[in-house]
Image: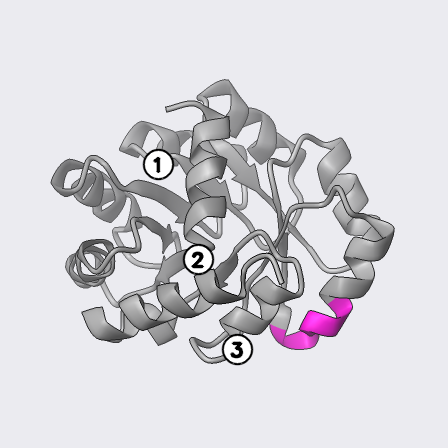
């Protein structure tokens, strides 16, 4: 799978399901529920103990899913995530080494940024999309304003986004949203309802 195909899947689904759990087994269970409910783009945060083992297991169990690693802070973690089978890397900050390592292995890179200056720096460093983080400190109105100045910026707000608020971020122009507990601790019905809601608001 090429980077553009990875990003196409993310943009099509509009949601990245973020998995944080107490251990690898719990992460795998949450991810598989999410994927089987129709959201086949999931990210396992490296703050989860055994996260890389979880990534590898999810990839084996659901090879058609696009599985990523989150909270990737350095090049070593980026390489290990790639070897575990991750297709994209997400970070709360901008580390050019993480981006170059991701691209070396054919992975999409979504570094974090909080301001227009940081967003431009991330794009100049080769980001495939930019994680607007933390979204709880921003708003859909801010996204609209940023995109007026930077219409070329593929933004993925993450951090504090709920199942209820996600459609508003999509309507504001976000390429996708990262949603954590609202999805991955819920049930299949929650995931399906969210996917329907965000698709309805896309393109408004």
Label whose residue precedes the other's in the sequence (1 or 2): 2
Using the image, tell me which numbered label, if any, was put on residue 15.
2
Q: CA distance from mark 1 to mark 2?
A: 17 Å
Q: Quadrant of residue 86?
A: top left
Q: Is residue 77 visible?
A: no
Report the magenta residues as a range: 136-142
* Residue 82 screen position, x and y as percent: 37, 30
Using the image, tell me which numbered label, if any, was put on residue 185.
none
Residue matched to label 1: 86
At label 3, counting other C-alpha atoms closer than 10 Å, the crowd grade (few under 14, some 14-19, many 20 or more) is some
Residue drawn at (67%, 45%), measured in percent from left and top?
Answer: 94
At label 1, counting other C-alpha atoms closer than 10 Å, the crowd grade (few under 14, some 14-19, many 20 or more) is many
Q: CA distance from mark 2 to mark 3?
A: 12 Å
Image quadrant containing the N terminus: top left
Q: CA distance from mark 3 to mark 1?
A: 27 Å
Disc 1 versus disc 2: nearer the observer: 2
On screen, 67 above or below 96?
Answer: below
On screen, 118 above or below 95?
Answer: below
Left or right of residue 196, residue 154 in this image: right
Residue matched to label 3: 165
* Residue 173 screen position, x and y as percent: 66, 58
Residue drawn at (75%, 48%), measured in percent from left and top?
Answer: 119
Which of the pair 52/179 is nearer the observer?
A: 179
Disc 3 versus disc 1: nearer the observer: 3
């Amino acid at each position: 799978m090429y980077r553009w195909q990875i990003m196409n899947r993310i943009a099509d689904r509009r949601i990245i399901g973020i998995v944080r759990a107490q251990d690898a087994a719990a992460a795998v269970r949450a991810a598989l529920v999410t994927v089987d409910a129709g959201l086949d783009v999931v990210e396992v945060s490296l703050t989860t103990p055994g996260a890389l083992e979880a990534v590898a297991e999810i990839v084996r169990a659901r090879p058609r899913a696009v599985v990523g690693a989150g909270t990737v802070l350095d090049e070593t973690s980026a390489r290990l995530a790639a070897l575990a089978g991750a297709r994209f890397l997400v970070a709360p900050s901008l580390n050019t080494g993480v981006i170059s390592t991701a691209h070396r292995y054919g992975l999409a890179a979504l570094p974090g940024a909080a301001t227009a200056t940081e967003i431009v720096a991330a794009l100049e460093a080769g980001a495939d999309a930019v994680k607007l983080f933390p979204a709880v400190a921003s708003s859909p109105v801010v996204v609209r304003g940023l995109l007026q100045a930077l219409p070329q910026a593929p933004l993925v707000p993450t951090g504090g986004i709920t199942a209820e608020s996600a459609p508003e971020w999509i309507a504001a122009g976000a390429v996708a949203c990262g949603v954590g507990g609202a999805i991955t601790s819920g049930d299949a019905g929650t995931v399906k309802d969210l996917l329907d809601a965000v698709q309805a608001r896309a393109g408004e």
